[in-house]
Amino acid sequence: MPAFCPTLSFLLLALVGPSSALSPRAASRGVGSIAAARARPAVSVLDASVLAPGSTTTDSTAKGVVVPTAPFLKPCKAEEEPLSGDSYVPPEPLQLQDGDALEAKWDRLRGTRKRDQLRRSMALQTFFLKAGWKTVRANMTDDDMRTAMTAAWVRDGLLQLGPTMIKLGQVFSSRKDLLHPAYCEALESLQTAVPCVSASRVRELLEAELGSPLPFDSFDDTPLAGASLGQVHRAVYKGTPVAVKIQRAGLTEMFDTDFKNIRLGCRAMNLMERGYERIRRMQGKSKAAADRDWMAYANDAARLLYEEIDYVNEGKNAEQFAESLVGTGSNVVVPKVFNDATTEKVLTMEYIESVKMTDTPKVDALGLD
């Protein structure tokens, strides 16, 4: 696997670097380096979209880590003409896919055996290499149509590789100061259009965690929403309407392999960055950027993701958040957690109607600013 590690670095350079994923016209907006951001408490109101009436929330599936730009790339040219709306070509929309078929494909790419890990590592590195090359080529031509096609190809590739890469795409989708608009628009669809698995598979996962028969008075087989790490269903538990979040299968094994590859790429990024700084010193030039450790970003991302798939911890965070509001006069409502029907892979919370912050007409109708 070490022989493949530069491919992740190649894709990071291509996507984040102003001389690649940003078209020359878009690059004039400027690129700044950013520190890793800490995630807010893992309260499931964000993932399940359950808040009090009149409240708003974002679909914050991409919380946790922001990747800094590489300082050793060619700087942007401030005199270049900004990207105009007339020339922008949006990417093709994400095509609906069968959730079970997609899960079956992910199953073939995960496991604890060395053979399974090698198969997934090769799939990851092959994608990174192709994506980096396609991104660089699209930028070199400055062809908006090719950029849009490449953005859609990268998005579809991340979806095929599974939850970790979907999460990576969600993180980058919010980096409009770093990426060409086509990449942001393509990756944004990974926040809301991740296919859900069938009711039969969901029930298998639930019974493995909660036993059979299920403890719910009723359970809606139609999901409310799907995300990179799980999906949410409505149910009734002891007479109370609840939202049940069910984690996708095999996430821990997939994370283990994926972060081995990500860390290899980050080691390569550290070596490349330090080598570039040595060359600058030999040329008598000043330091290009502040010291940074890409491995630290990878370790922080891993810590946050492993915490995010521990639903018992998420439930405790929700309860702690609710307790912190007592006596403050706040009108924020945190759904109650039902610990008797919660495990590390299943989270059961009170269901409360809500609207998304990005749903402007509904937010305006509620009179919210």
Image (cartoon, helix red, strand yellow):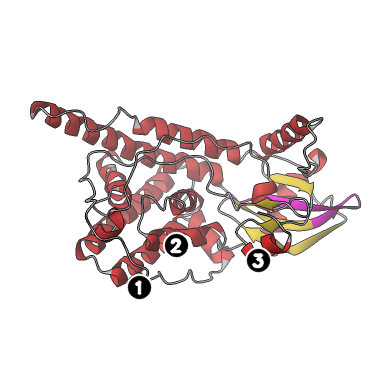
Label 2 packing within 10 angstroms: few (<14), some (14-19), many (20+)? many
Which segment did they paint magenta?
235-249
| Residue 86 badge | 1
Q: Give coordinates of residue 62: x percent, y percent.
A: 52, 48
3D distance between C-alphas at marks 2 and 3? 20 Å
Instruction: Name the residue tied to disc 3.
Output: 361
Q: Mark 1 is on which residue type?
A: Asp
Q: Give coordinates of residue 90: x percent, y percent.
A: 40, 70
Q: Is 244 in the magenta?
A: yes
Q: Mark 3 is on which residue type?
A: Pro
Q: Is residue 160 visible?
A: no
Of label 1 and label 3, which has the lower sequence position?
1
Of label 2 and label 3, which has the lower sequence position?
2
| Residue 185 badge | 2
Q: Nearer the viewer, residue 106 or 66?
A: 66
Is residue 68 left or right of 134 when viewed as pictured? Answer: right
